[in-house]
Amino acid sequence: MKLTIAVITKNSSLDKLFLKSLSLADEVVVIVDSLIKSPSKKGKINYYYHPLSQEFSAQRNFALDKSHGEWVLFVDDDEIISSELMREIRQNIDQTKFSGFLITRKDVCFHQVLNHGESGNIKLLRLAKKNAGKFIRKVHEKWEINGRVGELSSPLYHTKDRLISGFLPRMELYSSIDSPELTKENKPFSYFRLFVNPLFKFIYNYFFKRGFLDGYPGLFQAYLMSSQSLTVRVYQWTNKSSF
């Protein structure tokens, strides 16, 4: 089975280590929302321009349309595909009754794997047959596919060494898009959510999910996830007050 790896990025100049992790794909589709204005090709890597336009799912669906493989694996430009994961992917897509696979993503912060908190054992649908379904939701997008979903054991590594400088711009962008989405999903602004959700988010990550076992990075992660929960509620309040 032919495998396409799809990458969504703002920068067409990708890291060498990241590019190396893509080398076993039959095809690589890179969707860039800045810098290039027309398609280009470098070896097996195909670059396409598609603006974000406040909708991440549209970029991913555009990547599906441009992919030629029977299977598509989505990775971000701050993630690394281990050789173990690539071998497992190859073994499974050639002989499976599943339409997609969940992949465990492990955060790596300052060269330390975070094994706790809500991201310590997160499983994401990142690998599926091209024609199995489409992405929905403008941010924190979800790949809705038809058919059975399996699970792979080898992890995808998510590097977070630029913890603050990388997180804060994304937090503002995601919250601005997510706030109206939550309202559409019958999760409108309330003062209860404003005060309780961020606090519970920290307690959940740091204590219930044992983020404290990851040391200072676990503390920082729990704090930032709580800050994101607060920020999206502030955006909801701002949108509500502007009417």
Image (cartoon, rainbow, N blue to C red):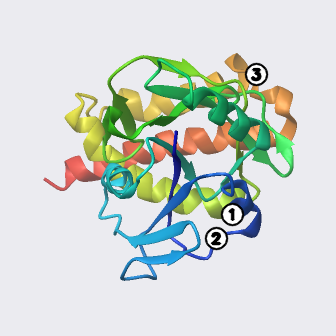
Residue position for label 3: 210
Residue 19, label in figure: 1
Does the CB distance between marks 1 and 2 fall below 8 Å? yes
Does the CB distance between marks 2 and 3 fall below 8 Å? no
Looking at the image, can residue 59 be seen? yes
Name the spot of residue 169 as percent of width and height, x first: 53, 63
Residue position for label 2: 14
Residue appearing at x 32%, y 38% in the figure: 131
**In the picture, residue 49 is in which quadrant?**
bottom left
Please rate how many residues cluster around mark 3, counting C-alpha atoms within 10 Å: few if below 14, some from 14 to 19, many from 20. Answer: some
Q: Secondary structure at mark 2?
A: loop
**In the picture, residue 108 is in which quadrant?**
top right
Mark toward the start of the polypeptide (1 vs 2): 2
Nearest to the observer: residue 72 or residue 199: 72
Looking at the image, can residue 123 be seen? no
Residue appearing at x 75%, y 27% in the figure: 116
